């Protein structure tokens, strides 16, 4: 394994690979795809989750990270071949143990990228309708909107974000599993099943059995804090959840402040902004106080057994600032954690690099949280969704922060 591959597996990509990802993103932008700098960061992180010597895995990871829509798949594949697999981008490499030598066009993308001689990447702002040129990735209004903190956003921003979500969510909400299942004509050959089938035909393999990685269908339960300290963030999170339900049918949503309210019946197809307005008008004590422990205990008592099982990922959206009994937070979180597949806490305060979970409610919850992730802007919510879907596919990492 090369030094660069070792760095990628430890989450420390080489500068040459970063520049190559930036160049690839620039080509995608030049082809009319909506690719931002946040997507480039996601692409680097996605490469740490796959086998870097598997071309198909790398291609799939990049396509998911850049959120490529189906109509652009052929264009993406051509750009992937030109940037990552072009024969003049890689030098001679020795075969890994147990692997045959690859032709230049089949080299692992990481090897090709790090063999190429690339210069420093320069960032510059571009107009929304401008076409990226050369090898310089740039900003766009959509990129700036995704990075804008929710507390600085207006009602017009909520409407713009809704339109952006409608374009991004279909690719964000799907991820192929690591497990292999029986498939039709596409997929890798399953020799064991093929041999079993051949018994009935005298040992002749008339039809080869195949296996493929299925697209995961996440099962999510979202509990959103709607207290005063979460007012602005709650509106954007609920808009995100409302839009998400169009592509993830198996999602349950609740709001909590001083009481628990089930929101799922309100998440119907239609205008997202109006749906959020109906929720803010209908939820009791919206933007009031908060009793995290009491409301989570109510969820455990009334809904945990019916809505949460070993395939469910539970997401709690809250800043962890609580006026209730802290001991109840720990009791409720322990019950949720013991039943759910994973528990992920989305905290707007975690968007600050200096944040530490020192609030009493957060300290009580931390032993039972698999991941604590930021939720301060649209980009952080998109990354959190990737974490939620990855949890269903078995790709999520160990407990801790997702920076």
Image (spheres, rainbow, N blue to C red):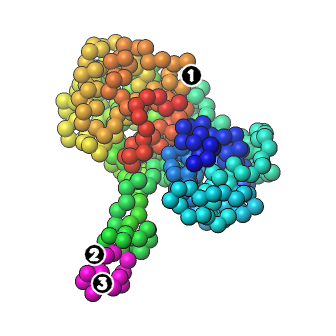
Judging by the rendered image, the residue that carries numbered circle 1 is 353
Q: Which residue is pictured at 66% across the width and 40% down the height?
A: 14
Does 37 sit above or below residue 256? below
Q: Which residue is pictured at 56% across the width and 64% down the height?
A: 100
Q: Which residue is pictured at 56% across the width and 22% down the height?
A: 352
Q: Position of residue 48 (x, y in %)?
A: 54, 44
Q: Is residue 24 left or right of residue 221?
A: right
Q: Position of residue 277 (x, y in %)?
A: 44, 35
Judging by the rendered image, the residue that carries numbered circle 3 is 203
Disc 1 vs disc 3: which is toward the camera? 3
Q: Is residue 8 left or right of residue 172?
A: right
Gap in angstroms between the C-alphas marked 2 and 3: 9 Å
Does 403 sit above or below residue 220? above
Q: Is residue 226 left or right of residue 125?
A: left
Q: Nearer the viewer, residue 145 or 374?
A: 374
Q: Secondary structure at mark 3?
A: loop
Disc 1 vs disc 2: which is toward the camera? 2
Q: Nearer the viewer, residue 403 or 87?
A: 87
Gap in angstroms between the C-alphas marked 1 and 2: 56 Å
Judging by the rendered image, the residue that carries numbered circle 2 is 196
């Amino acid at each position: 394994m090369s030094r660069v591959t070792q760095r990628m597996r430890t989450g420390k990509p080489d500068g040459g690979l970063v520049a190559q990802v930036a160049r690839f993103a620039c080509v995608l932008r030049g082809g009319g795809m909506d690719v931002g700098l946040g997507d480039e960061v996601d692409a680097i992180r996605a490469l740490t989750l796959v086998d870097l010597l598997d071309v198909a895995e790398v291609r799939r990871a990049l396509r998911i990270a850049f959120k490529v829509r189906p109509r652009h798949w052929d264009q993406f594949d051509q750009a992937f071949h030109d940037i990552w697999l072009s024969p003049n981008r890689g030098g001679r490499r020795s075969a890994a143990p147990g692997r045959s030598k690859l032709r230049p066009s089949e080299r692992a993308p990481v090897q090709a990228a790090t063999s190429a001689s690339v210069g420093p990447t320069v960032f510059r702002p571009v107009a929304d309708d401008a076409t990226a040129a050369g090898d310089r990735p740039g900003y766009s209004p959509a990129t700036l909107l995704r990075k804008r903190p929710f507390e600085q956003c207006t009602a017009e921003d909520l409407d713009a974000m809704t339109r952006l979500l409608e374009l991004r969510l279909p690719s964000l909400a799907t991820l192929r599993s690591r497990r292999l299942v029986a498939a039709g004509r596409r997929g890798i050959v399953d020799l064991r099943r093929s041999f079993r089938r051949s018994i009935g035909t005298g040992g002749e393999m008339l039809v080869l059995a195949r296996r493929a990685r299925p697209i995961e269908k996440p099962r999510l339960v979202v509990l959103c804090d709607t207290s005063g300290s979460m007012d602005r963030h709650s509106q954007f999170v609920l808009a995100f959840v409302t839009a998400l339900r169009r592509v993830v049918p198996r999602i349950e949503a609740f709001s909590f402040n001083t009481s628990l309210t089930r929101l799922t019946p309100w998440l119907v197809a239609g205008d997202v902004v109006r749906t959020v307005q109906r929720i803010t008008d209908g939820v009791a004590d919206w933007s009031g106080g908060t009793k995290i422990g009491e409301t989570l205990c109510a969820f455990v008592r009334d809904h945990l057994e019916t809505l949460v099982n070993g395939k469910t990922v539970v997401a709690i959206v809250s800043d962890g600032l609580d006026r209730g009994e802290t001991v109840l937070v720990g009791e409720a979180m322990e019950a949720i954690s013991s039943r759910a597949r994973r528990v992920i806490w989305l905290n707007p305060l975690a968007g600050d690099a200096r944040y530490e979970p020192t609030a009493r409610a957060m300290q009580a919850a931390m032993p039972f949280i698999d991941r604590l992730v930021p939720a301060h802007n649209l980009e952080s919510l998109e990354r959190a969704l990737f974490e939620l879907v990855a949890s269903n596919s078995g790709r999520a990492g160990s407990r801790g922060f997702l920076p």
